[in-house]
Image (cartoon, rainbow, N blue to C red):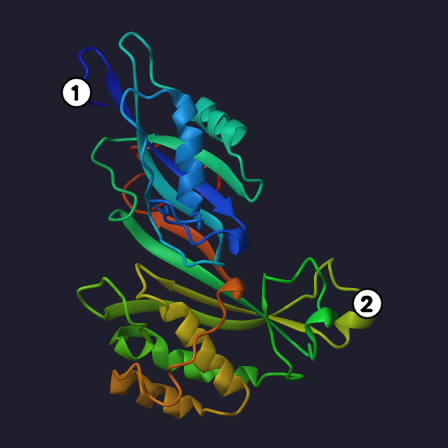
Amino acid sequence: MGSGPVAGSVRARYLVFFQYVGTDFNGSAAVRGAQRAVGVQNYLEEAAEKLKSVVPVKFIISSRTDAGVHALSNAAHLDVQRRAGQPPFTPEVLTEALNTHLRHPAIRVQQAFRVPTDFHARHAATSRTYLYRLVTGCARYDQLSVFERNRCWALRADRLDMAAMQEAAQHLLGTHDFSAFQSAGSPSTTSVRTLRRASVSLDPAGPFVLPQESRRLQFWSLEFESQSFLYRQVRRMTAILVAVGLGAVTPAQVKTILQSRDPLGKHQTRVAPAHGLFLKSVRFGGLRDLVPGLLAHGLQGP
């Protein structure tokens, strides 16, 4: 797997999948310096210090998420360089060690895989899927189960026009310049993206909603898949689709907004709250032969 700068030591690279409830974090990326805000990466790298790597371990995260955004499964690569004569950690030992030393209960390392030393978790990702959760019929915040708070966007409206939202979502599919749905501060050099999937569906209430509440509350899921997204693109697309569902914007207007490439227009400045957004999965191509068991374990694959 390659040698590092210390004679006799071996550098091993791993791909790790991890999840988190984003409520307490200032996003997935590490926050450096004396600031009080903390990112998920800060906790992961703190746990990795216990591995006693010759070179400090740094997590290169595949998908950056904002403050308050959750992840059902994010990914990162990291290098661990043990002292001469010590074999590399097995992926199972690495996973257990990181989880043992993680100090925040809202973060969990799901699984690790050994990968080639030139593998890059951000550049090698071929697909990212985001899930946005909504609930309608919630006139007051205290009407929502404590188990659902900070995990969905609660709307006062009794219902949404799902057919109109699905029609509007079709206008977003394909390769377009998504400048109209990009927030300021994006590091991307191009605003052209290919949206492979945009779906709107009703969800069952689930175990956290009482039967009498399920007659009033309705849960919704919006899913978006692309190789990559612009800064806050998913939250802005969600906001415009909700506006369509409420009757404030027509499906045809969504096409016009997309073609305008104007992020400061009347409707497209809306951004859905962070707490309803989940990074659902990150997938990688070309790892079937390099990483045995990647597909068998039910996480990500080509």
Q: Which residue is mark 1?
A: 5
Instruction: Kindly check if marks 2 and 1 are in contact, taking CB atoms under 8 A apart as contact.
Output: no
Element under disc 2 = helix
The vertical placement of 226 against 164, above or below, is above
Query: Residue at image x 58%, y 40%?
Result: 105
Query: Residue at image x 44%, y 81%?
Result: 240
Q: Position of residue 302 (x, y in %)?
A: 34, 46
Using the image as rendered, state which of residue 185 and residue 95 is in the foreground.
Answer: 185
Amino acid type, callout 1: Pro
Q: Is residue 177 left or right of residue 270?
A: left
Mark 2 vs mark 1: give the one in front.
Answer: 1
Report how far apart the C-alphas of labels 2 and 1 lie in the structure: 62 Å
Q: Which residue is mark 2?
A: 211
Element under disc 1 = loop
The answer to whether residue 16 of the structure is visible from this angle is: yes
Res 67 → quadrant:
bottom left
The vertical placement of 255 against 56, above or below, is below
Q: Position of residue 218 (x, y in %)?
A: 67, 74
Q: Is residue 224 left or right of residue 70?
A: left
Name the image quarter holding the N terminus.
top left
Q: Earlier in the sequence, mark 2 or mark 1?
A: 1
The answer to whether residue 295 of the structure is visible from this angle is: no
The vertical placement of 68 against 10, above or below, is below
Mark 1 surroundings within 10 Å by alpha-carbon count, few (fewer than 14), some (14 through 19), many (20 or more):
few
Amino acid type, callout 2: Pro
